[in-house]
Image (tube, helix red, strand yellow):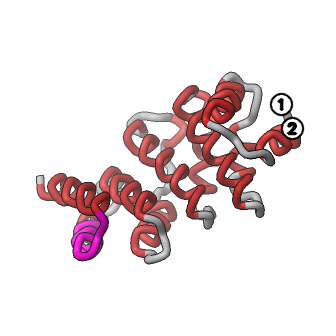
Amino acid sequence: MTKDELLEEIKQTLEKVKVEKLAAIAGAGGLHFNDLIDLSFHQDKAIAFRASWILENATCLQPEEFWKNAPYFLNSYNAQTNNSCRRHFTKILMWVVKKKANRKELRGFDWTAIIESTFEWLSNPECPVAVKVNCLDILLGLKDQQDWIAEELRAETEFLLRNGSAAMQSRGKKVLKKLRS
């Protein structure tokens, strides 16, 4: 399936079954992950959201296909401005951070820009809670990348817990507990 054919498919409202079908096609090499990443920046926010949703599902279905494109995804991550897409991007990045050990695709990767963007999203009052709680897990997983991350994450989490939603309270407390241990 070409990028243009994919675009035609995702111009229509998608249900989970169709997303899973398109994700399976991507995972089998019928779609390029980079095309899904590119379409997640589409000016039409609905198209961008659908592409991100398919990308997340394709990553879960065929992780080895994703790893071939991981550097492209990581280099695109910071530029994502659509909060609906950020939710999927952060879920993918949570998975990447958990699996990154010894991945040849990530050797020598500079995490600085991703860490900075993730902290920006976390502290942005306009950013949805679902994205913020994912950011907490990402930063917890990257805390050993630079000395200052753990302390800044602790401070930001404590601030967010003051008036945070139930989801923020739950995840924030877990993050603080892990930071203390």
Q: Find disc 2 in the rendering and name its residue.
A: 5
Q: Which mark is residue 145?
A: none
Q: How many marks?
A: 2
Q: In the displayed image of the protein, which residue is found farthest to the top? A: 28
Kindly report the secondary structure that dominates the magenta region of the rendered protein: helix
Residue 121: percent from the left, percent from the top? Answer: 47, 68
13 over 152 or under it: above or below: above
At numbered mark 1, what does the secondary structure look like: helix, strand or loop? loop
Crowding at mark 1 (Cα within 10 Å: few <14, some 14-19, many 20+) = few
User: Residue 46 magenta-drawn?
Assistant: no
User: Residue 158 magenta-drawn?
Assistant: yes
Residue 123: percent from the left, percent from the top? Answer: 40, 74
Q: Quadrant of the N terminus?
A: top right
67 over 82 or under it: above or below: above
State the residue at coordinates (29%, 66%): 153
Task: Using residue 156 as the reference point, say whether residue 7 is left or right of it.
Answer: right
Please state the extent of the stretch shown in magenta in the rendering. 153-165
Residue 46: percent from the left, percent from the top? Answer: 71, 56
Using the rendered image of the protein, determine whether residue 148 is visible from the camera's viewpoint.
no
Q: Find disc 1 in the rendering and name its residue.
A: 1
In this view of the protein, which residue sits in the foreground, 64 or 43?
43
Marks 2 and 1, how far apart at CA: 6 Å
**Quick check: marks 2 and 1 in contact, CB under 8 Å?**
yes
